[in-house]
Every structure is written in C-alpha cells, then in structure tokens.
Image (spheres, rainbow, N blue to C red):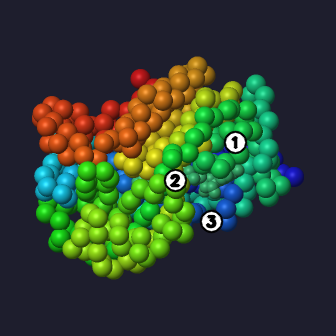
Amino acid sequence: MTTHDTDILIAGAGPVGLTLALALHQRGIAVRVLEKRDGLSTASRASTFHPPTLDALDSLGVLKPLLPGGVRIDRILWRRVDDGSAASIDLGILADDTGFPHRWHREQQDVTPALLAALPPDTVRFNAGAQALAQDDTGVEVTAADGTTHRARYAIGCDGAGGAIRALAGIAADTNDYAHRVLRLLTPLDLRDHIPGLDGLGYLYDQAGSCSLLRMPKVWRLIFRVGPDMSDEAALEEDHARARIARFLPALRDLPIEGRDVYGVKRAMALSYQAGRVLLAGDAAHLTNTRGGMNMNAGIHDAMTLAATLAAVLHGAPDALLQSWAEARLRVVRDALLPRTDARVAATPADEVARMAALTPRETLTWAREASMLDISRVGSPA
Ligand SMILES: Cc1cc2nc3c(=O)[nH]c(=O)nc-3n(C[C@H](O)[C@H](O)[C@H](O)COP(=O)(O)OP(=O)(O)OC[C@H]3O[C@@H](n4cnc5c(N)ncnc54)[C@H](O)[C@@H]3O)c2cc1C
C-alpha cells in the first residue's frame, strides 16, 4: 500500500469536487481528487447555471469556450393557459450585480470535462472511491478502493448524496423525500414558436397545476410533477405523457418526444459541514428539489468559498476560519436554499401569475437576485 501526500484531498469528481480542485490548484495548493467511477458521470442532471456560478466559472477561466455550446436565457415567463394572463422578468435588471445578468442552460455533464481538462494530468484518480478515513491533529488519511492511502492536511467530501465521507466522518443528516417525483419529456420542437413571450424558461399554470419548460441547446425539457399514487411506469406511458402535454399545450399534444424519464426528489441537509479536518460541499452536504435549479449552483458556491477559506488557512490564518465557513454555508442551506426551493414547490398554481405580475420594480429586483442566488453565493468567503 502506497501513501501519497497532498495538501487537500477531495473525494468526488463531480462539478463541486472539480471546481474546488481547480480553485485550489490556481492558488498554488497541492490537491488530489479520488473518484469512485472509472470516468466522469455522463448522466443528464443539472441544466441551469445562475449568474454567480457563471462569474465563478469565468474567474476559473473555463467558461468562455463553453458558452457557444449552451443557451443564454434572458427572460422568465409565467403564463396562465386558461385565461392567457402572463408575467415576465428580464434578468438584465441584474447587470449591476454580475458580469452575466442571465441564466445559461447547458448539461452539467458538458461542463465537468472542461474543469477536468484545466487541472494538471493525474490530479484525479479514477476507480478510487474513498472507503476508510482516519484523522489526527495534523491531517487526514483516506484509503481508496484501489488500495492506495492518501494523507492530506484536510479532506473534503464532494462525493454526492450517495458518498461515503459524511458517514465516515460521523456527520449525521436530516433527509426526507418530497412527496412527488418529476416526469421529464424532451422535445426537439422549438416551443418559442408556439408560446407568446417565451424565451428559454417558462412556467405554465392552470387552476390546479403547473408545467415548466426549459430550453436546452438541442431540445426543450417539459417538466411535470408526478403524484405519490402513480408508478414511474404509469407516468412514462404514452397516453399519460400526451394527456399531460394536452393540459398545458393543447395545440401541441402530438409534439415529437425524443426522450423521457422520471426521477425522485430529495431534501437533505448535513447537520454540520465539518468534523475536525474533514469538510463537506455540494450534494454531500445538501439536496433540494430541482425546481429553481439551485442545488449544483449552491455546491459550486460552496466550493469557491471553501477554496478561498482553505487557501487563507494554509497561508497562516487560524483554523477557526474553517469553522466559520462551515457554519455560514450551513446557514445558507437551512435559511435560504431549502426554504426558497420549498416555497417554489408549495406555491399555489392559481395565484402564481398574478403574484409575479403584481411585483413592484424593487420587489422584482429582489426576486431576481434571490432566484439567481446572488445574495447567498459569496456567504462564507473570508473577509
Ligand atoms: C434531473 C436533475 C436535474 C437537476 N437540475 C439542476 C439544475 O438545473 N441546477 C442545479 O443547480 N442543480 C440541479 N440538479 C442537482 C445537481 O445535479 C447536483 O446538485 C450536482 O450534481 C451536485 O454535484 P456534486 O459534485 O456535489 O455531486 P455529484 O455530481 O453527485 O458528484 C459526486 C461524485 O462523487 C463520486 N463518488 C461517490 N462516492 C464516492 C466515494 N466514496 N469516493 C469518491 N468519489 C465518490 C461520484 O461517482 C460522483 O462522480 C439536478 C439534479 C437532477 C437529478
């Protein structure tokens, strides 16, 4: 068994672990990533990159070459399909707050390879899931599935919801499933040609329900809630999918569907982000509903603020700075990320369009800042 030394050891080469690794590397800190899989995940998951995340990826030098492969979304639409009432918000109102006053839609799996490519070769060790962990006053030792042992001054669990580090470090979590699941249909039809005022993100409502429309580079995602009394198989059936489309887009009932899936949504929060020299970031620390597209973004903000904090500590700042970071990011999850997502999930469909249309300009700006996470993205950064 070989022991490898590094400053910072990261478990997990998802968007959060790779962002953290790159942000540390660019500060001259030695970093190694252990990844359980034999390559990066290619699952279709996050689609939405919010303004502060774009600022972060730009500061790491990886964003600009990726931009042409994604779609820029300037406006969000809310529309009642029964009475035609509508509201919209132009994200350009955020121009004073960010270099990217818009959303950007691209598959998460298209962004992680760019982060990996910006790291020195051999930073990431694949087929090396973290399996055991021990810590003392000066460092942490992690044993990986390939039999290697890695000693670092700090270890960071970026190993996702099913990872090992949180439990190995003895950190408990509060976890609940949301009562519903999500049906996702993919269509190549450009919905902008059929829905007045639609740019790249729309919420359609009737009295009792809603449907979200998200423009991706090659397809649109149509997103519906599936109640607890319906099986995944039933939700995926053709007749059911067509009925759901017809309810919100009657003229497009027969639109081409080129992909469909159902996924469950969980709500989870680690009770601490830190146990000694072990810290957590991303899905290893928090999970939310996908509505609003915030959880990966929050994880990338965890990574950016943690990199700045670790750099300060490695350059002589007191260890207590890490505790402040851990407490600050936990408060972000508990007081903003989870309640904000829950409020969107609980919103009453019949009232949403009128509520958005009634916002004053000042309330609209506050809404846009919160929906874009601009108010919480830097919380935890050292002063
Ligand atoms: C359908 C869907 C849509 C979504 N849409 C959005 C969205 O629009 N916006 C948004 O912000 N979020 C969204 N999310 C959430 C987003 O996908 C996650 O928040 C994001 O992947 C978290 O990144 P991560 O790096 O923390 O974890 P992960 O992406 O899960 O990466 C963890 C990595 O750790 C590895 N690993 C696991 N165990 C170990 C171990 N023991 N040792 C080493 N490595 C290990 C895994 O193989 C994996 O590569 C969506 C999720 C889903 C499912």
Q: Which residue does the numbered mark 3 point to in the structure image? A: 39
Q: Mark 3 or 2 closer to N-term?
A: 3
Structural crowding at the residue carrying mark 3, measured as other residues with C-alpha within 10 Å and reported as few (<14), some (14–19) or many (≥20):
few
Assign a secondary structure to mark 3. Answer: loop
Q: 60 or 89: nearer the eye? A: 89
Residue 165's tag is 1
**Could you say where residue 351 lies in the image, as x and y percent from the top left?**
23, 42
Q: Quadrant of residue 36?
A: bottom right
Q: Mark 1 or 2 closer to N-term?
A: 1
Vertical comparison of 304 with 234: above or below:
above
On whether ligand 1 comes within 8 Å of the CB at mark 1, the answer is yes
**Could you say where residue 141 lies in the image, as x and y percent from the top left?**
77, 39
Which residue is found at the position 75% from the left and 39% from the top?
168
Q: Mark 1 or 3 closer to N-term?
A: 3
Q: Is residue 381 left or right of residue 173?
A: left
The label nearer to you, 1 versus 3, is: 1
| Residue 177 visible, this orientation | yes
Going by the numbered disc 3, the residue's amino acid type is Gly
| Residue 19 visible, this orientation | no
Q: Is residue 1 left or right of residue 357?
A: right
Q: 64 or 131: nearer the eye? A: 131
**Could you say where residue 106 lies in the image, as x and y percent from the top left?**
37, 62
What whole-number distance in Å separates the C-alpha atoms at marks 1 and 3? Answer: 19 Å
* Quadrant placement of the C terminus: top left
Going by the numbered disc 1, the residue's amino acid type is Ile
Going by the numbered disc 2, the residue's amino acid type is Pro
